[in-house]
Image (cartoon, grey):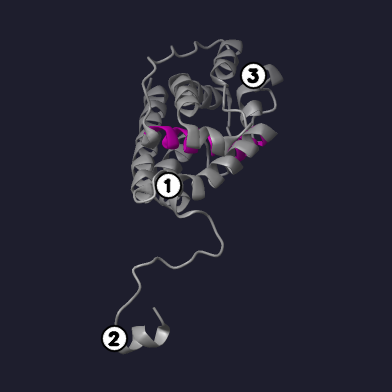
Amino acid sequence: MSREHAMATGETSVLPPVRRSGPPDALRVLRERTSSPHAGLDAGLTGDDRRVADEPSYLRLLHVLATLHAGVEAPLHEWVGVTPWVRDALGDVPLPARAGLFADDLVSLGATAPDPHLAEEYDDAHGLATLYLLAGSSKGARVLLRGLPDDVAPGARRGLTDAASRDSARLWGAVVSLLGAPLARAHPSTHLDLAAAAADRAAGVFGALHALVDGRRAS
């Protein structure tokens, strides 16, 4: 439709504007819908300066991360393995496998590791939510590592060290790419609805983990 025709008739194109730069629309949906619960969880785990002040605070952080990874890693790996468009988009980038590292960190500090959850079968919304949660942790892990108390031994930092690794950064880049053209091709008419459903699942996880933090602080 020409600009002149649109001005003369008042009609507008049904096609969305072409995005020349910036993140994929699906990623923007995920960020916008999860920003508040994500910030709430961060505030419950660290101070305003994103530092872990002492060992009890670090134990709470480790328990939350160990609980999350123990519950989601196995079904995430299975979903990626049986979902060709996701597997192809991620390529050779390794998926997170650090539940055991967080559990070992807890044990090294004299705490008890959480029991693994029963694995559940993921649909695409659940799988994308989990990918977004785990892949997005690499930058935060680097910040947390820098802010740990000096008396936290290297042997109690293995989970965060893995989360801050180059492979984790590569995974985030692959997930950002996946949320663009691969997602749109796999779900051409519903990809933004799927992103919204994934965001709602991720927000629910942030909320559940925040409640876990509050419960451990009160105990």
Residue at image mark 3: 156
The quarter of the image holding the C terminus is: top left
Question: What's the distance in space between the residues labelled 3 and 2, CA to CA?
Answer: 68 Å
Is residue 137 in view? no
Residue plotted at (41% across, 84% down): 3
Q: What amino acid is labelled 3 in the image?
A: Ala
Q: Which secondary structure is most common in the magenta stretch?
A: helix
Residue at image mark 1: 30
66 left or right of 153?
A: left
Q: Is residue 102 positioned above or below 53 on the image?
A: above
For marks 1 and 2, the one nearer the N-term is 2
| Residue 23 picture location, percent across and down | 53, 55
Residue at image mark 2: 9
Residue 101 within the magenta-colored segment of the rendering: no
- Which region is colored magenta? 126-146
Q: Is residue 137 positioned above or below 150 on the image?
A: below
